[in-house]
Amino acid sequence: MAVRQFTLAPCRAAGDFDTLLMEALEDLSVSWMSQPDGTVTLWVDGTEADDARGALLSKDIEIMAERDEPERDWLEESAALRKAVAAGRYLFDPHEGERASPPGRRRRIYLPAARAFGTASHESTRLAVRLLQRLSVAGLTVVDAGCGAGTLGFVARLEGAARVVAFDIDCDAALAVREHAASNGIAGVLPFAGSTAALSAVAPWADLVVANMLREEVLPLVPDLARILKPGGLLLTSGQLAEAEESFVVELSRAGFEVFLLLKENEWLATASRKRGART
């Protein structure tokens, strides 16, 4: 939709200029901003430009200049600023075509900035990827809890996992996983939209669960994640603050997990722990 931009001269009339503008333009779709030099920049829907012009002149407000503001794709401009991120054997690239980054010897995974999910650029995602590469997942059944775009599920599958379930409470996540799996040629990742309770309603069936979530998000899910895991199964977490390492490890221990590996990047912490005992 076209937008008309007006530059208004500093107000010489008595009273508040904002109040004057509100009175003149109250029935129109407009916004404005005062500039350091005293002028005002005003934007109005292009279909209402003539009405705005007449309303301004009726209040003796001087229009210094006006022009059509070009339409901009803000989502595209934002996506263009994103850069490919390398993590071990993988290159996570938000671009394709001419803007795609050469992967070199890494496996490129295309993750566009879409559906409000991440593009694997955050430290916590890189930490989780490092854990998946450091621990052998070959032949395992893996759950990517709170999967978002499916990044960690894809890595687990490419690292040799026999079966991957990528689940999230957001239905859009399941669609994103399906789309990204197809565009990257990755089979064997099953998207699931629902709760952890639904996944834990049967006997323990997973060998490894990976969850890249904030502490406040993951801790309430740990009991259900424990029920999903077979005895001796692995829980990988990322997205916790390193400064809270001690208390987070205590919480995992209380839930029946023994932490055996910690990784850190800047202020972020990732953990690998093993489920103790058998399911009760």
Image (cartoon, rainbow, N blue to C red):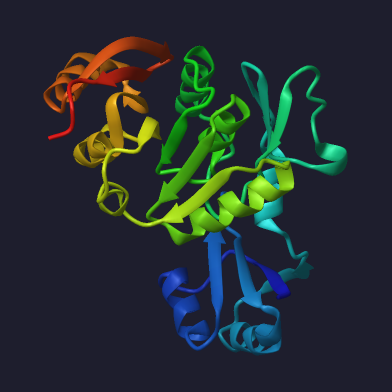
As drawn, 245 above or below 68: above
Q: Residue at x 37, y 55 (%)?
A: 169
Provide residue 271's location: percent of width, then percent of height. Answer: 34, 18
As drawn, 178 above or below 71: above
How many numbered circles does the render carry?
0
Provide residue 251's location: percent of width, then percent of height. Answer: 16, 24
Query: Residue 29, located in which quarter of the rendered image?
Result: bottom right
Q: Is residue 110 visible?
A: yes
As drawn, 220 above or below 246: below
Provide residue 116's location: percent of width, then percent of height. Answer: 53, 52
As drawn, 210 above or below 70: above
Tell which of 171 and 4 is nearer to you: 171
Question: In the drawing, does residue 30 fall left or right of residue 8?
Answer: left
Q: Is residue 37 visible?
A: no
Quarter of the picture containing the N terminus is bottom right
Q: Residue at x 54, y 17 (%)?
A: 133
Quarter of the picture containing the C terminus is top left
